[in-house]
Amino acid sequence: MQSLFAWLLLLATAVAASDYHEQLTLRPLPLSSLLASFDFRSNTSFSDYESQNFRLFPRSLAQILQHAGTRELHLRFTLGRWDAENWGARPWDGTKEGGTGVEMWALVDAGSDEEADQKWLTLTNTLSGLFCASLNFIDETRTIRPVKSFQPEGHHTEAALAHSRLLHGVLPHEVVCTENLTPFLKMLPCKGKAGIASLLDGHKLFDASFQSMAIDVRPICAEGQECVLEIEETIDMVLDINRSKRPKGNPIPRPVKADELVCDQSKPYHSEDTCFPVDHLASPDWQLDQVFGRPMKGTCPLADATVPSVCIQVPDKRHVFTSEGSVQHKGADGQSRCYTMDENNDFTLFLARPDNPGEGLEVVEPETPLLYAERSLTGYGQEKGGVQAILTNPGNEDVEFVYLESLPWFMRIYLHTLATHISPNTTTAVDFSTPSSDIIKEIYYRPALDRVRGTQLELLLKIPAKHTVFLTYDVEKTILRYTEYPPDANRGFDVAASVITTLSPRVMNLRTTSLLLYLPTPDFSMPYNVIIFTSTAIALAFGGLYNIIVRRFVGADEGEQSPLKAKLAKLKEMIAAKLGKKSAAPEEKTAVEAL
């Protein structure tokens, strides 16, 4: 009987393992940085999903999706800025990245816009409690319905798409913290106690230069197989190796000793007493448990054993040492290697310093992105301003993409001022007096309504190879009611990042940085002074008038004597009587002596 139970347990584990896998990919970047990409993927059949028979799919999230009628969900928690000029193209082609703060879009089952809004409200409020985030503040003023961007990623029938609505919302001011990481780990099968998730520490994750947490739920229908509902959780972080290697007990950076300095000997001034250190340029050595603060606790027993748990992308000439019991599998490209390990033993990895620092072949050459994008505010004053986006195509092919702006209602666009200026990627100045009209192919514009909805602007653009486009438009800043300002009104208002979705030569996503918009802000001490002055004047006027109307004036001898006055008068008589007896006693004694 015991052997039969053990066999059934082994069979159940094997079946479950085929539905879940996890993998950590490490890629050293230039300037002593390290990209760590965690990928967790599991699925469940629709029959189990509808009957609420959850094995690896998180029940807490599944019940929310069922209650809100959600067919597809995408959620992003992002902090920091991806340095595309030094780090190259974004991981996952930017599909797992969101704008600064919290970004969310979903495909809900609804036959009308009103029904979709109600289900969207239910979804945001319930997810707000699940992930300890302020998703409940994504109201109608922060919600848009994309037309060209954010197309459904899962497999849906035409009938299902016809009876669905795609909604998108963003909170650029949301601060991502450990409270959002904890629910993320609880949805994993091993709860962060084993496998690559055991490396996730909030102190390391939120100390990164860039970090993004993503959750994607979508239906997948492979040919010849049953359709499943897949959930994919990813975490991408860029760590500063030198900062991450500092011990917890002594986090203050210390100067490197003279005998440990690595000098650039190609400098003409190099000598025994003159050194130009190259530690910040070369790829340093590092160890997995140093960078993450802890070793990896074996492997998750529910994960697919055929998928290597850890992969690292470094040239073959770099020396990599791992814990005993791990098996290395080198990639055919000569730029990567993966490791399978014992599920019961801790795992660590050590990447040695290059043999000849500064001579190349230290890190895998970063891939050049299709586009470079940056955005900033223009103009001056508190009433009007503008926005400028600089889009650069560094490649040899034309790039067609969709540019999406989701602006708050108090930032009104003057659409007639929308203009593009194009120039080659040279150092020559751009002639803004001659705008280019053949860059923008299509425009979708949904104007804002005060306190009802924001502005939605989608542009279909095409940039020639080796060219830069300057996209500009003017805006007007609205004066808010004083009750609509936040407590830190003088800080400004966060404006969500622009979303760029390339269509050709391949599909990828990228976000610009968010903006900080300054609005006309009243002096909040003046309303306080007015309130105090008005309250004092009303109190004095009302108090005096009330006394005149209510108080009755009578003579002192006409009014009825109150019990308190009677007691005081009686007490006064008793005191006077006692004082009279004391004054009479000496007179009697003197009379007796005289006799």
Image (cartoon, rainbow, N blue to C red):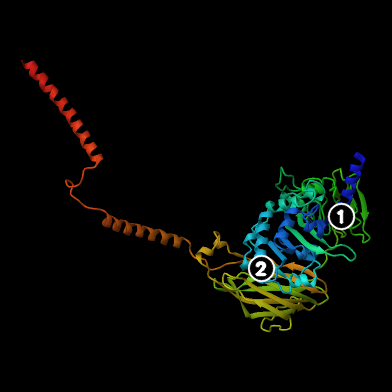
Q: Is residue 259 visible?
A: no
Q: Which percent across, then down, holds residue 179?
A: 68, 51
Q: CA distance from mark 1 to mark 2?
A: 45 Å
Q: Which percent across, then down, holds residue 109?
A: 72, 67
The residue wearing badge 2 is 115
Tag 1–tag 2 contact (CB < 8 Å): no
Disc assigned to residue 344: none
The residue wearing badge 1 is 311
Near-viewer residue (421 or 176): 176
Q: Residue at x 71, y 70 (%)?
A: 165
Residue 358 occupies quadrant: bottom right
Residue 491 occupies quadrant: bottom right
Q: Residue at x 76, y 78 (%)?
A: 462
Q: Residue furthest left?
A: 595
Q: Judge left or right: residue 385 versus residue 459.
A: left
Element type where label 2 sits in the image: helix
Q: Residues within 10 Å of mark 1 (few under 14, many from 20)?
A: many
Q: Please identify the quadrant where the N terminus is shown.
A: top right
Check the image and report above or below for 423 versus 365: below
**Residue type highlighted by circle 2:** Glu
Q: Is residue 120 visible?
A: yes
Q: Which percent across, then down, holds residue 184?
A: 73, 53
Element type where label 1 sits in the image: strand
Q: Please identify the quadrant where the C terminus is shown.
A: top left
